[in-house]
Image (spheres, coloured by chain):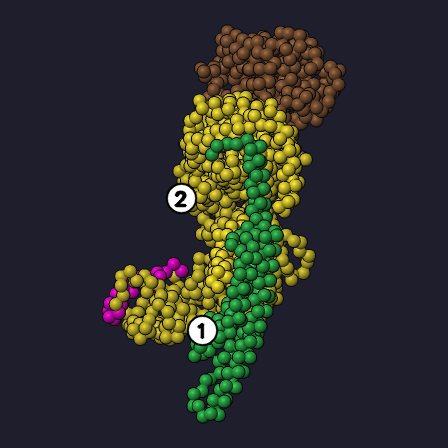
């Protein structure tokens, strides 16, 4: 071992201590970033869920022939696409710094979710109206002795789901689509 | 030696016969010396009887009874040989034959037949014993014997076998012949052994030839008892009564003189019974009894079984000798008695006429010799001064001996040799010693002897002893000054034992006295068990002592004295009996017995002290040799010097090992001076500490062995000791000492009483530790250490001291920051380092490099050089810098350790986490959704 | 250190015992001109701490002073500490004990001869054993009572010194002193005297010893009992042979024995 002077020894010790303290601080910051990330992730997943439900709803209505309503989805996409913050593409920096970029991202996610949900509820109402119509026609046909009968129950359930805050799973939606398109 | 004699042995025997009865009246009266002192125990005759009377008064008492008075009994009590027969014989010769009929039954006459014959003889009656024909009497006796055989049993068993023998015609004929002879006092004894053998073979009784005497004796006893029972006893009573009556009728009163009743058995009892029946006759009976017999046998022998009963019937009881067996009045009469006998034996105009003056008519005795011999008379271990012993074993033995009396007396088993009171000088021959012992006149300062006696008997003496016609030998035991306590009463006895041992060796019962005397003389020169210097004066001294045995000096008296031979580690002063030492031994015994001053007792103190010195030296040497052998060749001095050197080496130079202050023995004190590292030389370090605790004892031992004063060397002893010391060899010897044998070492350190092994143990362990230390390896290790230190110091050469100061101060708050508790002692280290100057460090580095460089030349396997190096090393490595530097290092270590514990180091890059990658997928999917319209 | 105190009484060196005096003299004799410092080095135990007052050297200084006062040793140099020392014996090649006795006996100052005078008085009075207390009483009543003030300490010193020289004997555990010379001392004296006198006359030898070293005769002109004992011991131990010839001119009585000649065993 090469001997050092006492001073060198002390310098090294102090430096090492400083290093240790720095590491400590960074560990604490990392924890914070992780928390932010989890929050943001949750928001974005909600947004994505809403958007997905909106698109299904629009698709369903479109399959039922309501073209106007289907246009709602496209408009919404444009609107969210144009308003998306930079951080949506690479959120790392925003999460670590926790600055205004992060705020924009959070606001975007929250705002997007609200818009998607609002429009989905509108579409759900339209759908409900159309199911009622279908039901009436069904009962007429039944009265006319038309033996062909459509089970409307799955449609109603889909509707139920769409109109609430809940989100249909992909499988449920596929099933619903099959039902409606029949 | 020559012994001119002028007497006829037969004449000597006849004059000196102790059987008074066998002497002619004329000869008897020539040699008889009147009894002047006969003690009267009691006497019922009227008159006042003082404690002692002469023989004439005794005669008057005995004869004072009227002729027809009933039986009157007198006891004469005395030791065997005290003169009972003499007295009886004298009475017999002196009584008036017209008024008294004396019947004297001597001690030798023990058979009833003899007594009866004697009585008949006195009575003047017919010899025939009985009216019955002798053959009938013999038949009666034989039949009685058979009855006794059956009743009593004994040697002759079974009775059926022997009855026919007893009843045989042959035996009866023998008995008849014996009865026919009875009148003759000196008749043949009954049944000789040869006859018994014949009788047995005749009747087919097989008796081995070696048993014939026993069988014959048994037969004789049996027939004798039958004889007494059947025949004589009844006859004797009748005879006695007859005798009494006849005598009274003649106007004479019978006087029965029975010398010694002890000798009779049944006969004695019956005689006594007859006489005690006071009305049975008119006898005056003087009965001799030995003291012991009266007490133990006589009482039981009577019908009543009570001595008082007998005493009540006695007229008087006379006693001839005292409890010690000394005849009353004999001492005073001694010379006259001897003179009377010698006069009856010797003739004048003898070959010694020219020297007669020296003997005063007592040749071959002098009065001194007679008295000394008389005083020395012993029988069966007890002193016994009786006339018979004097006549037989002093006078008779001397006259009949072929050597002069002193030699005869020396050899006699009846005489206890008196101690010689003169000094056992060279030149005093055995003969002269013997002559002086018996004939020497004991004066105040010397023992003297008429030179004519020695010349006559051809005893030579050194010329210087002759003076004025006398031989003069200085006394060993001069009269004590009045202030001295009288010596032990038994001092003569002890002296006798000593002289006997000195002359012949063998058991010496009172040897303890000699030992104490020897011990006293040897201790005059100091204690030979102490191995220190006798010239050491310091009160701080200690010495090694031999401590086997008790406090007393162990002494062995040689030549079978009864002492145990010293063995093994038990060494004793040996005292022998060399002729030239004898006078000194006598003086030592006397010194011990008397408690007198040495200068008064010792004839030549210079010689006594030389004797003591010789024994002192040889014992001291033995003790030293013992120690040396037990310690593998180390002497006491080598041991002390080795211990001292080891301690000195351990303590190092500069310390005052002889400081009289009690040194501090705590561990810190040891740590400050030991050259050994507790880590790297752990064994030397710990064993050194154990030895170090003994430093005061070792210092005291050094003072006791090598100084005159505490601060003045005994140069002679010290130089001798150190020149004798080979510390390397002694170290090895010490290391090789076997601890198990040390445990039994009989040596201690005094004062203090520490067993020597208690010191040897740490010494041996330390020596072994030093011996076992791998010196080259230790050197190398130290050199590495030094090199490391040197490098360390060189690294400090350009130290920025102000910056160091700042950093040191920073340490404190850094500790606070990470939670390290601050020790106060750390301040000291910090202060040391803060205050240290470049010059200080320079000096230190110089010292270290000097040590490294200097040691380089001396590197060897020599433990002493290495120890010296360690001592030089100690102040350098004890410099406060090192501990301060070490403390700072420790603080830093603590800091880092605490920091590492306290601070987390698990920080990561967020973007590289899986969670972030998931997030990216979410956003990608989201964007996908929006594009996918 | 004080100036040499040569005037101090020999008998006042009461702390001395004898062996240290002999040892010091032997050392000085062996190394003539030896300095004080070297004496200290030789005679003080190694490692002895030297105190400011050099008390440790006191026994050495006492012995040195005694030798100087007795004239056995001379000092060259003014201050003792800086001086050198050499032996100045009156007689060549005699043992130290005899030499010291000679120096004391022939000292010009009567008071310095006191050690020999006490012995002379005891021998003349035919004393054989005596306690120190009794010695003091005797000298205080005797012809030397006015030499100086006699004390118990002086007498004790006398007994220690003379017994160490072999002139008298002290026994352990006993108080009395035996006025009996040790045979070795007497033998050494006889050996010396034998060389000086013509013929083997014991009387001549003893007279010479009496004049030179120590007293041998009582006031009545008889050989002292202690000397007789020592002579007899020498005879008995075979180291000397005593004889008497009827025609000898001088003879002495040894106790009862008349002796005219002495022959010593050759060394």
Picture layout, residue B655 above or below residue C186: below
Q: Residues within 10 Å of mark 1 (few under 14, many from 20)?
A: few
Please state the chain letter of the residue tagged with numbered disc 1 in the rendered image: A
Chain C shade: brown
The segment highlighted magenta reads: B185-205
Chain B shade: yellow
Q: How far apart, in angstroms, are the residues tagged by discs 2 and 1?
A: 176 Å
Query: Which of the chains is green?
Result: A
Picture layout, residue B893 above or below residue B125: above
Q: Secondary structure at mark 1?
A: helix
Q: Is residue C202 magenta?
A: no
Task: Tell which of C209 and C46 is nearer to you.
Answer: C46
Q: Secondary structure at mark 2?
A: helix
The residue where tag 2 is placed is B10
Res. C166 in view: yes
The residue where tag 1 is placed is A174
Res. B570 in view: no
């Amino acid at each position: 071992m090469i001997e050092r002077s006492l001073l060198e020894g002390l310098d090294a010790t102090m430096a090492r201590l400083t290093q240790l303290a720095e590491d400590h601080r960074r560990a604490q910051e990392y924890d914070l970033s992780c928390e932010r990330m989890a929050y943001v992730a949750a928001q974005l997943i909600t947004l994505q869920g809403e958007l997905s439900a909106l698109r299904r709803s629009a698709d369903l209505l479109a399959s039922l022939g309501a073209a106007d309503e289907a246009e709602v989805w496209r408009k919404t996409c444009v609107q969210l696409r144009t308003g998306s913050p930079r951080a949506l593409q690479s959120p790392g920096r925003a999460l670590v710094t926790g600055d205004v970029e992060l705020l924009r991202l959070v606001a975007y996610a929250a705002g997007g979710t609200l818009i998607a949900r609002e429009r989905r509820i509108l579409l759900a109402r339209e759908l409900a109206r159309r199911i009622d119509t279908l039901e009436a026609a069904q009962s007429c046909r039944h009265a006319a002795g038309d033996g062909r009968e459509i089970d409307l129950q799955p449609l109603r359930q889909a509707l139920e789901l769409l109109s609430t805050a809940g989100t249909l799973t992909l499988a449920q939606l596929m099933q619903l689509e099959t039902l409606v398109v029949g | 030696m020559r012994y001119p004699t002028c007497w006829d042995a037969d004449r000597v025997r006849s004059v000196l016969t102790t059987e008074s009865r066998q002497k002619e009246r004329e000869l008897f009266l020539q040699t008889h010396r009147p009894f002047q002192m006969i003690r009267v125990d009691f006497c019922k005759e009227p008159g006042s009887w003082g404690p002692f009377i002469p023989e004439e008064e005794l005669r008057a008492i005995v004869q004072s009874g009227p002729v027809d008075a009933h039986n009157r009994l007198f006891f004469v009590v005395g030791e065997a040989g005290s003169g009972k027969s003499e007295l009886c014989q004298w009475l017999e010769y002196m009584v008036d034959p017209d008024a008294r009929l004396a019947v004297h039954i001597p001690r030798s006459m023990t058979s009833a037949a003899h007594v009866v014959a004697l009585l008949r003889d006195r009575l003047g009656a017919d010899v025939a014993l009985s009216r019955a024909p002798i053959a009938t009497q013999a038949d009666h006796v034989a039949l009685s014997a058979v009855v006794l055989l059956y009743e009593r049993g004994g040697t002759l068993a079974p009775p059926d076998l022997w009855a026919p023998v007893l009843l045989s015609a042959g035996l009866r004929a023998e008995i008849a012949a014996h009865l026919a002879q009875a009148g003759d006092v000196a008749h043949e004894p009954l049944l000789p052994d040869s006859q018994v053998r014949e009788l047995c073979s005749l009747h087919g009784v097989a008796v081995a030839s070696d048993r014939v005497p026993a069988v014959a004796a048994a037969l004789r006893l049996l027939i004798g008892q039958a004889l007494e029972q059947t025949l004589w006893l009844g006859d004797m009573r009748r005879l006695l009564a007859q005798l009494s009556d006849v005598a009274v009728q003649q106007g004479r009163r019978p006087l029965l003189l029975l010398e010694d009743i002890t000798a009779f058995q049944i006969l004695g009892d019956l005689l006594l019974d007859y006489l005690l029946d006071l009305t049975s006759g008119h006898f005056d009976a003087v009965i001799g009894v030995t003291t012991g017999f009266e007490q133990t046998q006589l009482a039981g022998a009577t019908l009543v079984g009570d001595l008082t009963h007998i005493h009540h019937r006695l007229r008087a009881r006379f006693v001839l000798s005292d409890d010690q067996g000394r005849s009353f009045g004999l001492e005073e009469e001694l010379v006259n008695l001897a003179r009377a006998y010698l006069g009856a034996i010797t003739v004048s105009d003898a070959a010694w006429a020219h020297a007669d003056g020296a003997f005063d008519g007592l040749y071959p005795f002098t009065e001194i010799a007679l008295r000394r011999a008389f005083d020395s008379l012993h029988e069966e271990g007890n002193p016994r001064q009786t006339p018979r012993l004097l006549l037989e074993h002093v006078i008779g033995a001397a006259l009949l001996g072929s050597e002069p009396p002193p030699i005869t007396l020396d050899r006699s088993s009846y005489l206890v040799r008196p101690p010689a009171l003169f000094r056992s000088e060279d030149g005093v021959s055995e003969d002269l010693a013997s002559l002086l012992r018996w004939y020497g006149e004991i004066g105040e300062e010397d023992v003297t002897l008429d030179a004519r006696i020695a010349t006559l008997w051809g005893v030579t003496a050194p010329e210087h002893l002759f003076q004025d016609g006398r031989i003069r030998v200085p006394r060993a035991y001069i009269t004590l000054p009045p202030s001295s306590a009288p010596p032990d009463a038994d001092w003569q006895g002890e002296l006798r034992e000593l002289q006997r041992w000195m002359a012949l060796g063998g058991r010496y019962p009172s040897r303890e006295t000699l030992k104490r005397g020897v011990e006293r003389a040897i201790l005059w020169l100091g204690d030979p068990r102490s191995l220190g210097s006798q010239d050491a004066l310091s009160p701080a001294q200690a010495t090694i002592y031999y401590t086997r045995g008790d406090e007393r000096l162990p002494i062995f008296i040689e030549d079978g004295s009864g002492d145990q031979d010293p063995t093994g580690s038990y060494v004793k002063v040996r005292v022998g009996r060399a002729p030239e030492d004898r006078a000194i031994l006598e003086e030592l015994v006397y010194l011990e017995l008397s408690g007198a001053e040495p200068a008064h007792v010792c004839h030549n103190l210079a010689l006594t002290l030389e004797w003591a010195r010789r024994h002192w030296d040889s014992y001291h040497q033995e003790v030293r040799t013992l120690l040396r052998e037990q310690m593998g060749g180390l002497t006491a001095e080598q041991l002390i010097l080795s211990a001292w050197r080891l301690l000195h080496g351990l303590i190092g130079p500069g310390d005052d090992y002889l400081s009289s202050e009690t040194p501090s023995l705590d561990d810190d004190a040891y740590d400050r001076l030991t050259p050994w590292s507790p880590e790297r030389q752990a064994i030397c370090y710990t064993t050194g500490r154990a030895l170090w605790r003994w430093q005061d004892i070792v210092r005291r031992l050094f003072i006791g062995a090598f100084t005159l004063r505490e601060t003045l060397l005994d140069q002679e002893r010290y130089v001798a000791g150190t020149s004798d010391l080979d510390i390397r060899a002694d170290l090895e010897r010490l290391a090789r000492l076997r601890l198990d044998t040390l445990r039994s070492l009989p040596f201690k350190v005094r004062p203090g009483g520490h067993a020597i092994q208690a010191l040897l143990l740490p010494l041996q362990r330390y020596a072994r530790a030093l011996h076992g230390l791998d010196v080259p390896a230790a050197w190398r290790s130290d050199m590495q250490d030094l090199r490391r230190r040197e490098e360390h110091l060189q690294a400090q050469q350009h130290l920025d001291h102000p910056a160091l100061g700042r950093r040191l101060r920073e340490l404190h708050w850094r500790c606070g920051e990470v939670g390290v508790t601050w020790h106060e002692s750390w301040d000291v280290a910090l202060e040391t380092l803060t205050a240290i100057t470049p010059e200080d460090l320079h000096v230190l580095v110089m010292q270290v490099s000097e040590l490294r460089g200097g040691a380089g030349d001396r590197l060897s396997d020599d433990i002493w050089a290495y120890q010296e190096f360690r001592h030089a090393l100690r102040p350098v490595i004890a410099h406060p810098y090192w501990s301060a530097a070490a403390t700072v290092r420790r603080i830093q270590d603590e800091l880092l350790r605490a920091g590492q514990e306290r601070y987390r180091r698990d920080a990561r890059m967020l973007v590289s986490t899986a969670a972030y990658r998931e997030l990216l997928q979410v956003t990608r999917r989201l964007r996908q959704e929006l594009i996918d319209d | 250190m004080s100036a040499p105190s040569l005037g101090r009484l020999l008998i006042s060196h009461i702390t001395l015992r004898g062996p240290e005096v002999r040892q010091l003299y032997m050392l000085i004799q062996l190394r003539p001109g030896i300095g004080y410092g070297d004496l200290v080095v030789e005679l003080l135990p190694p490692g002895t701490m030297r105190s400011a007052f050099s008390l440790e050297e006191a026994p050495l200084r006492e012995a040195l002073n005694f030798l100087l006062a007795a004239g056995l040793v001379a000092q060259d140099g003014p201050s003792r500490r800086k001086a050198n020392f050499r032996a100045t014996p009156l007689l060549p090649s005699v043992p130290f004990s005899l030499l010291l006795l000679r120096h004391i006996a022939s000292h010009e100052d009567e008071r310095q001869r006191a050690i020999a005078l006490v012995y002379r008085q005891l021998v003349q009075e035919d004393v054989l054993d005596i306690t120190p207390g009794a010695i003091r009483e005797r000298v205080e009543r005797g012809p030397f009572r006015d030499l100086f003030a006699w004390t118990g300490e002086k007498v004790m010193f006398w007994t220690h010194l003379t017994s160490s020289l072999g002139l008298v004997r002290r026994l352990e555990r006993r108080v009395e002193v035996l006025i009996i010379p040790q045979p070795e001392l007497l033998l050494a004296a006889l050996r010396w005297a034998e060389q000086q006198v013509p013929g083997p006359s014991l009387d001549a030898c003893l007279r010479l010893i009496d004049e030179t070293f120590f007293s041998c005769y009582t006031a009545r002109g008889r050989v002292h009992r202690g000397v007789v004992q020592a002579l007899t011991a020498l005879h008995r131990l075979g180291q000397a042979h005593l004889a008497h010839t009827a025609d000898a001119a001088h003879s002495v009585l040894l106790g009862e024995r008349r002796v005219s000649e002495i022959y010593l065993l050759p060394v």
